[in-house]
Image (tube, coloured by chain):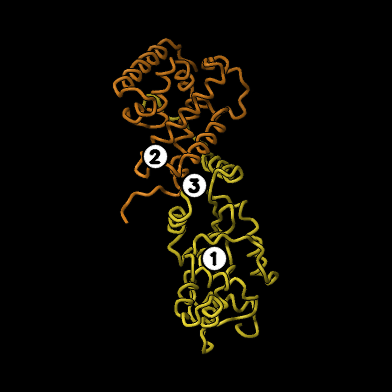
Chain colours: A yellow, B orange
Amino acid sequence: MFLPPPDLRPGEAAALAARTAARAADEGVAEVVYATVDSPAGRLVAVATPRGLARLAYELENGGLDTILDEAALKLSPAIVEAPARLDAVRRELDEYFEGRREEFDIPLDWALSTPGFRRLVLQECARIPFGATRTYKEMAIAAGSPRAFRAAGGALGSNPIPIIVPCHRVLASGGGLGGYTGGLDRKRLLLGIEAPTLFA
Amino acid sequence: MTTARLPPFQRFLDAHRDQVLRFLIASVGRHDADDAFQETFISALRAYPQLRPDSNLRGWVLTIAHRKALDVHRARGRNPVPVAEIHDRPAATPAAEPPDHWERVRALPPRQHEVLTLRYAADLTHAEIALALGCSEEAARRAAADGLKTLREELRDVPATA
């Protein structure tokens, strides 16, 4: 060609894009930020708004990063960028939790991705279950004010947008069985094992 | 649902970053390209949530990049940086400086410079260029042809160097 385009150095545009995304997050131009977080339960995708953490997704169980971001763009805002530094606190608290050095999370939460009403109430009640304790689906239905809606309570917990931090793994079947889990039962066992090693190890 | 949706901004940024950076290096030089790149995508992000999902995203972001390049040229006093001045400037990484022909393109009349940069550094079609510059496709083609003609004549006059 008569006028070949300028050459780029390897990684130059990617590094510049990352700096731009970080700046967009710091200046509040990005309405939503995300980062990936490696954990013993597999890779997680954390998505936050200015109000707090809105989503913590098991990457593989939720269709991969692209699917998780598509959903966040649709339900929160398409103005979403990768900003690992903005999710440092989430990463740190999760690391401490998995190392057995943290029992409660201090990260602010944004409930925007849970359905308002009964479902959100169940999840907010769930967020109060202390480390090492467990509840039944029936107890969660009662706590949310609809004692007979234990199946719906199970559905609400299954739709938990912020697993681990909103500890739906602490809710078990009435007969003592594990019940279900959004990230698969192996992960439920893993999390319960961290919290009560004598019972679930 | 089959309705077109805007991709998450990060995906849009990743998809167009190379093209925008190439365009800006060609248009304003490597030294000012970093800032102009950030300004381009920050401006794009501000407008992004209101953008129609079926928009031509590539043409849109290069239109913004073109405006940021104009800001840089205006800040330099509306005059393109003379070729000699560029050579005098200490180059931090001489090997990565844009090839000489883009310096020549920058010295062309503004419309010719704009069209050639959008066409050959950003790989836009003449129709996309016409939209970005707010001119007719015919005017874009003519400016490109005029610019290329001048460049060919200049290159013919340049004595071969080692």
| Mark nearer the N terminus (3 vs 1) | 3
Q: Is residue B37 visible?
A: yes
> At 57% from the left edge and 77% from the top edge, which residue is drawn?
A170
Instruction: From the top left corner, tell me how far across and down residue A132 is, in percent.
Output: 65, 79
User: Can the viewer see residue A40?
Assistant: no
Kind of residue indicated by mark 1 = Ile
Q: Is residue A120 above or below residue B134?
A: below
Which residue shows up at 44% across the image and 15% down it? Answer: B108
Q: What is the distance, in whole Å, between disc 2 and disc 3 at their CAs?
A: 14 Å
Callout 2–callout 1 Cβ contact below 8 Å: no
Q: Which residue is mark 3?
A: A79
A132 vs A121, left or right, is right
> At 55% across and 75% down in the image, what residue appears?
A169
Quarter of the image holding residue B124? top left
Camera-side residue of A161 and B116? A161
Q: Chain of mark 2?
A: B
In this orientation, which residue lies closer to the viewer: B84 or B119? B119
Residue that badge 2 annotates? B57
